[in-house]
């Protein structure tokens, strides 16, 4: 039994610390942020919080082999997870704001770590392509959380006529939606930034949405093509 548990623990560490983590992060992010909103209910929101907690825990394990970095990430993740679950019990403005800030900081750290794994030494694999996509999703989610903070801190930061003035989970979901249509430069116009600071961050996200796929993802694909063509060139 001990040997079995040790083997399972070893496989989990291999997945989380290796390139397979890039696949795991993509799947968890997709499920928690893109499928759950279509089934809006109390149990589904609890399930979304559970999946989100798993993303954070797995992110801490894969963060770094340096104890200091993992300790800092672990403390931040524990704070974010606690505040996230506390929102289901006491959704006060202070708890919601602190929880949003903690999750935002952790998301930024996770995006940076994933980028390091994507562009680390070695050949470009499908795992790294998935990791690059996960970073793209993390950018959109992070900006959505940032918009949520701005919406809570600044008066009239965004024009959301159908959701009133009180910050709610539905309002955060709408801002996450707005983040992705800004990142992809769709710009439907149903939500608009109305404050100078919020407009500045919207412009920055739009620029990132244009530059990231055109440079980083294209670079990964080109490196993989070069790696596949290299043996044939050498043979010729």
Image (cartoon, rainbow, N blue to C red):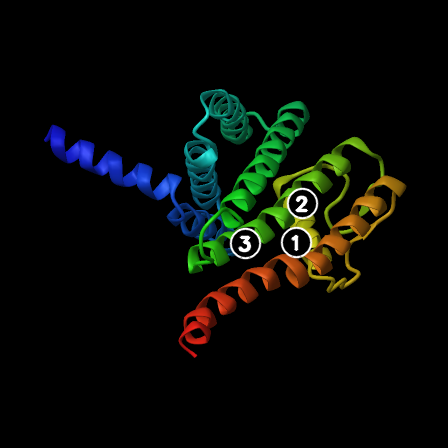
In the image, 100: left or right of 89? right
In the depicted structure, whether residue 126 falls above or below residue 225: above
Q: CA distance from mark 2 to mark 1?
A: 8 Å
Local crowd size for mark 1, using a 10 Å CA cut-off: few (<14), some (14–19), many (≥20): some
View extreme (right): residue: 196
Q: Looking at the image, do the residues carrying marks 2 and 1 touch, with CB atoms under 8 Å apart?
A: yes
CA separation, marks 3 and 2? 19 Å
**Eyeballing the image, is 185 above or below 56?**
below
Q: Secondary structure at mark 2?
A: helix
Q: Position of residue 218 (x, y in %)?
A: 61, 64
Mark 3 surroundings: few (<14), some (14-19) or many (≥20) residues within 10 A: many
Query: Mark 1, mark 3: which one is toward the viewer?
Result: 3
The residue identified by callout 1 is 177
Residue at 64% across / 61% down in the picture?
213
Q: Name the side, left or right, on which 150 lies relative to 10.
A: right
Residue underneath mark 2 = 144
The percent coordinates of residue 12 (x first, y second) are 30, 39
Q: Say the numbered circle drawn on residue 166.
A: none
Q: Earlier in the sequence, mark 2 or mark 1?
A: 2
Measured as percent of width and height from the top left, residue 7 is found at 19, 37
Residue sitting at x 64%, y 42%: 142
| Residue indicated by mark 3 | 132
Which residue is at the front of the view, 126 or 120?
120
Ranked by sequence position, the earlier of labels 1 and 3 is 3
Q: Position of residue 164 (x, y in %)?
A: 76, 43
């Amino acid at each position: 039994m001990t040997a079995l548990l040790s083997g399972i623990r070893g496989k989990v560490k291999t997945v989380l610390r290796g390139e397979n983590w890039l696949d795991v992060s993509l799947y968890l992010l997709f499920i928690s942020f893109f499928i759950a909103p279509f089934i809006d209910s109390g149990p589904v929101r609890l399930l979304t919080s559970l999946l989100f907690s798993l993303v954070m825990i797995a992110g801490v394990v894969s963060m770094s082999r340096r104890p200091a970095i993992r300790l800092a990430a672990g403390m931040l993740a524990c704070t974010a997870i606690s505040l996230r679950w506390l929102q289901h019990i006491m959704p006060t403005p202070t708890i919601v704001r602190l929880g949003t800030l903690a999750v935002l900081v952790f998301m930024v750290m996770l995006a940076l770590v994933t980028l390091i794994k994507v562009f680390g030494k070695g050949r470009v694999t499908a795992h790294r392509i998935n990791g690059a996509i996960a970073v793209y999703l993390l950018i959109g989610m992070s900006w959505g959380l940032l918009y949520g903070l701005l919406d809570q801190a600044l008066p009239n930061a965004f024009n959301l006529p159908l959701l009133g003035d009180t910050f709610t989970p539905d309002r955060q979901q709408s801002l996450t939606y707005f983040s992705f249509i800004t990142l992809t430069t769709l710009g439907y116009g149903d939500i608009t930034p109305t404050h100078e600071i919020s407009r500045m961050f919207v412009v920055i996200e739009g620029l990132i949405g244009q530059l990231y796929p055109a440079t980083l993802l294209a670079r990964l694909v080109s490196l993989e093509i070069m790696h596949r063509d290299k043996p044939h060139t050498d043979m010729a």
